[in-house]
Image (cartoon, coloured by chain):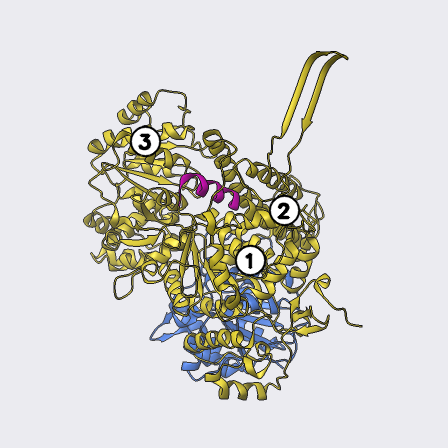
Amino acid sequence: MSRKGVKVKIGELKTDVGVIKNLELSVGKVVDESWAEPMGPTPFPSMTALREWDMKLLQRYKPFYMPFCDVCCLCTYGKCDLTGNKRGACGINMSAQQSRTVLLACCIGASTHISHARHLVEHLIKKFGRRKALDVGGLNVKVEAPIIRLVCGTKPQTLGDLEEVLDYAESQLTNLLAVTHTGQEGNSTDFESKVLHTGMIDHVGMEVADLAQVAVYGFPKADPDSPLVDLGFGTIKTEKPVILVIGHNVVPSIGIVDYMKESGADGEIEVCGLCCTAHDIARYHKKAKIVGPISWQLRFIRSGVPDVVVLDEQCIRTDALDEAHSIKAPVIVASEKNCMGLPNRTNDPADAIVEDLVSGKAIGVLILDPEKVGEVAVKTALRVAPMRKKFKTIPEAEEVVRRAKECKQCNDCRRACPQDLNIPEAMKAAGKGNLAGLADLYELCVACGRCEQACPVGMQIHSFIVKAGEKKLKEETYKIRAGRGAIQDVEIRNVGSPLVFGEIPGVVAFVGCANYPKGGAEVAEMVTEFASRRYIVVTSGCSAMSAAMHKNEEGKTPYENFTGEFAAGGVVNVGSCVANSHIAGAAIKIASIFAKRNLRGNYEEIADYILNRVGAVGVAWGAMSQKAAAIASGFWRLGIPVVVGPHGTKYRRMLLGRADREEDWYVCDARTGEKVYVGPSPEHLFCAVETKEEAMVMIAKLCMRPNDTSKGRAIKLTHYIDLHKRLFGIMPEDIPPFVRNISDVPVTMKDEIMKILKEKKWKETVIPDPTLLPRMIRKRKE
Amino acid sequence: MAAAEPWQTAEISGPKKASVITKPEVVVAMIKKAEHPILVVGHKAAEIDLGDRKLIDFIVDFAQKTKIPVVATAHVVSEFLKRSYRPAGWMPAVDIGNRLADSEWTGIDGKGPHDLALFVGLPYYMELTILSGLKHYASHLKTVTLDNVYHSHASWSFPNISTKDWQENLKVIIDKSEVGGK
């Protein structure tokens, strides 16, 4: 459909029958009704259209509030003390205030993705036109936009079709943000419903962004064999001029690569990236290198390797300009959302800008034309590199030892460290010439730099850690499969049945940021564990990078060791943050392609299907951002639980089931209308855990679904029990609620489990055709 | 005495702050007064060295002496089992937090709601958020942290103290405590 439609304006028209003056005729949009699928009940849903579904989820998975702050300081009545669920001056209580803050965070996250999508779509329409086809996988992907089809009830076929979708997302987002104003919503559960709505809208925005860039830029299109690309500090040819791009919006980076190719500088310059821009530039240009996740920003800049730093948007250190300046590397900022106080040189001649950057007259510039960013970055890098000579701020080992002797052992660094790393002890040893303690911190450090801010004698503690860990840093040479984009329809057909019936034990998606409790190696370990167990493992964003930064005994990373297919035992990197939409999209496509459920504007039914049948779990082990909050919320509304690492408790509330409350775990049997107890499956919707061991046991447990066949349930129980015994050293105590009949019991553990069932006076129940929606019951009970 | 400042500098306390445990006998008295106490132990208990023992070894001594039921979080149940001590339950820390916030919960042993929850060995920031949840939503419950760092959201907390002082305090608590609960 065409968003702009047709507009005819006639000033004066003389005809045989008379004169027509000031005639204006407008057709809003031309609707293409060639799509045979009937429209479902909730196309373009408003904030309250899916409220009943939300309430069903929130009734079972009630928020456990863990206020991160006891007061509200959002208006001038405040600060208001909300301790003990007291009400503030506006009447809001602590629960509502926590949910309100979560909503605010999710709005920030969703607006970031939607704004990113809008910029991409506008830019690409300007370059390629509204009619540019949205081909994201050729004949292999007929359901090209599962989230948009599900939520909006439209089937986008061209770039122009995405504008209407973004109009909807932006209008919803405005309403949702308005909800957080003083004196609007007052009920915590309704706030939570709106959180879920925000998450759904966020997924729409992410899908728009990735569809647009995949379709136009020639990224891998649903390709399980997308190329293996280089990742890690050690893969970067530091003898060349190096351009570092940081952020999430690939458009300026495309400008750099295109200019390099056009100007013949392709082989002369290294282009590398941090965070999701790195994913996307590697999807565009196989020779581009990924340095690592978000937490590698400080260490890489301070290493002196980058000659020019280009910043686009999102998750960029806001002191990146200062850091780059300290290594004498000019900075180009390329987004209206991140101007860094720099002069706007968009309309200046490229050579004049280059001259100013090379001479040091300007330490950085704002350029809002991506092609010009490309030209300036390349020309500047070529000229600056020989002058800079890789000037770095990481000190030599002798300097570290000398400065460490000044450490006062005041503990301020440790008390500022989010990881509570024992920096004072390592500094004490360093002062005696032993850097091993600091080196041990290298892989645990999230590189926030708070230790340096806290140090009363101004030591560059993070740089000391990087120096001590330099050998590890330089040996970081890995392979990651470039983000493949969507999942093919045929892959969904192949796994649909074994997944829904439980024979493939689950889909585990490792997503999100790098605020890991004990380093990124834990992500790689979990990925390997579940892929080896023949789960379908999906990765994206910084987690996808961390998963690559570990090799097995044969020197292979998980991406080399496992197939990239969306199949049992696959490790599937979908791509950057916005490619998370393909993970939700895969779950939706299982309902559509395998189960042949209508997708179009039919959110509630599909979410009910996924909650009860698709054993998918999201794991955001280092979730940090507001975007991560929004992404998680979108998964929750679809019925997909999310596990976060211990820092995730700072998201202010969990959505936890109560396994001990039998009454919470009944569903309707769609065949009979009977209420059937199905056990706590899945037990939680949002749960933080402490350790990777606990995470692995939790993931296996959360993959269980009411619809599992006995064969499937036995397989899932086998994994759950096996992991529990290995990592917890004991049989789980909660086996009985997961056993519906004797056939569910894994054969290899039969004696042990039967003994437990007998002790707990277990009773057999039926395996229903599960639903939480009364309208899905085919035959009502008399 | 060390100042009662949150261990993580930026975790500024709200209006209601934990009372400072100035001597271990305060904990002993809390346990004595409690009708139905519970002890929640995080995974760090098995990582922290106190002299030539681990923190969890002190916890096992304490639990055996007081008979206070233990809930092990994360995977630390395996460390208890290695020490031939079986906790009353194990579950995620947020799960036990959620249940403790429910005044209707029948407790880990089915004997009714708990009125005193002792916490130890969780990551600082995670224990902090869970204690916050209980401060705001569990008026039926007092919370005590046995960690050596100040937790402003607990009802009672030690200030930031050295591991040596911590070890001494734990020894006194173990020595002087009697069987907890009525």
For marks 1 and 2, give the CA distance: 16 Å
Which chain shows up in yellow? A
Q: Which residues are magenta?
A: A206-219
Can residue A336 be seen in this snapshot?
no
The type of residue carrying mark 1 is: Ile
Residue depicted at x 37% and y 36% = A254
Which mark lies nearer to you, 3 or 2?
2
The picture quadrant where one finds residue A111 is top right
Q: Is residue A643 left or right of residue A164?
A: left
Given residues A270 and B151, the one toward you in this image is A270
Colour in which the image shows chain B: blue
Tell me which label, 3 or 2, sits earlier in the chain.
2
Secondary structure of the residue carrying tag 3 is helix
Q: Are marks 3 and 1 in contact (CB under 8 Å)?
A: no
Given residues B155 and A105, the one toward you in this image is A105
- The residue indicated by pointer 3 is A259
The picture quadrant where one finds residue A262 is top left
For marks 3 and 2, give the CA distance: 40 Å
Tell me residue A584's x, y (percent): 53, 54
- The residue indicated by pointer 1 is A593
